[in-house]
């Protein structure tokens, strides 16, 4: 078997295993499924958990939608008590959106649910396997940090 063929076979095998693991882990009740958020609302919550705060324009660019759409999404998230709007201290014309304590708690609960199950799996691995997994995971993270990942247009669609 050629190296390229073996590489492709292994990548396919790993991808299929990860998909299967994802399906298995998704069977557990996650706060994600109890949140009643739309996909776009969830994206805003996750974006804010990564950035701390964002303007409506920044959210529109990241989501690839118009400012009017973002306003509606944010209005509903404010209604759920997950985000607040406040004046940008550097530009009073700009309103920034950030997570409330309830929004941060939701993100933590979603993350913790997945990590809790993954941890249960890892606890059953022997020490050599854990060392190998730690090494491979670090390599994957280093390569991912070097790769440019495409983002949505910063010019929002209307």
Image (cartoon, helix red, strand yellow):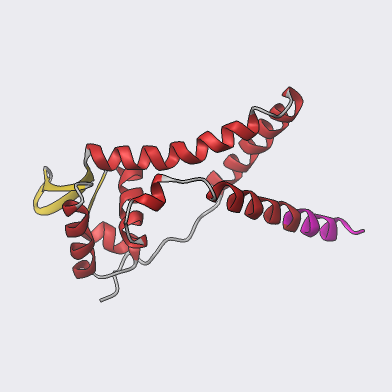
In the displayed structure, does residue 111 sit left or right of residue 104? right
In the picture, residue 60 is in which quadrant?
bottom left
Q: How many labels does the image show?
A: 0
Q: Which residue lies furthest to the left in this view?
A: 92
Q: Nearer the viewer, residue 29 or 9?
A: 29
Q: Does the stretch in magenta take in 7?
A: yes
Task: Determine the residue located farthest toward the bottom in the rendered image.
Answer: 158
Rendered residue at 58%/32% (across/down)? 119
Q: In this view, does 150 lie above or below 119?
A: below
For residue 112, side relative to residue 102 (left or right): right
Q: In which quarter of the image is the C terminus?
A: bottom left
| Residue that sits furthest to the right in the current view | 1
Q: Is the magenta stretch mostly helix, strand or loop?
A: helix
Residue 54: x and y, percent? Answer: 24, 50
Residue at image point 37% right, 61% down = 39
What x and y, as percent, mark residue 109? 39, 38
Q: Residue at x 32, y 56 (%)?
A: 36
In percent of the image, x 17 and y 58: which residue is there? 75
Quadrant where the N terminus sits is bottom right
Query: What span is in magenta?
Result: 1-11
Question: Residue 8 in magenta?
Answer: yes
| In the displayed structure image, the side of residue 54 where residue 144 appears, left or right | right
**Percent from the top left, x then y, of residue 111?**
44, 40
Spot the residue most to the top: 127
Q: Is residue 155 above or below residue 94?
A: below
């Amino acid at each position: 078997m050629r190296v390229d063929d073996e590489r492709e076979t292994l990548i396919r095998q790993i991808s299929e295993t990860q998909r299967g693991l994802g399906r298995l882990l998704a069977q557990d009740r996650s706060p994600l499924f109890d949140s009643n958020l739309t996909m776009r609302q969830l994206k805003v919550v996750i974006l804010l958990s990564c950035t701390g705060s964002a303007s409506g324009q920044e959210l529109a660019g990241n989501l690839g939608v118009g400012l009017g759409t973002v306003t509606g999404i944010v209005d509903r998230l404010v209604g759920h008590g997950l985000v607040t709007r406040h004046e940008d201290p550097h530009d009073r014309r700009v309103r920034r959106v950030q997570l409330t304590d309830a929004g941060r708690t939701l993100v933590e609960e979603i993350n913790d649910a997945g990590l809790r199950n993954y941890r249960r799996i890892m606890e059953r691995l022997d020490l050599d396997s854990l060392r190998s997994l730690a090494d491979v995971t670090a390599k994957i993270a280093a390569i991912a940090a070097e790769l440019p990942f495409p983002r949505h247009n910063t010019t929002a669609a209307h």
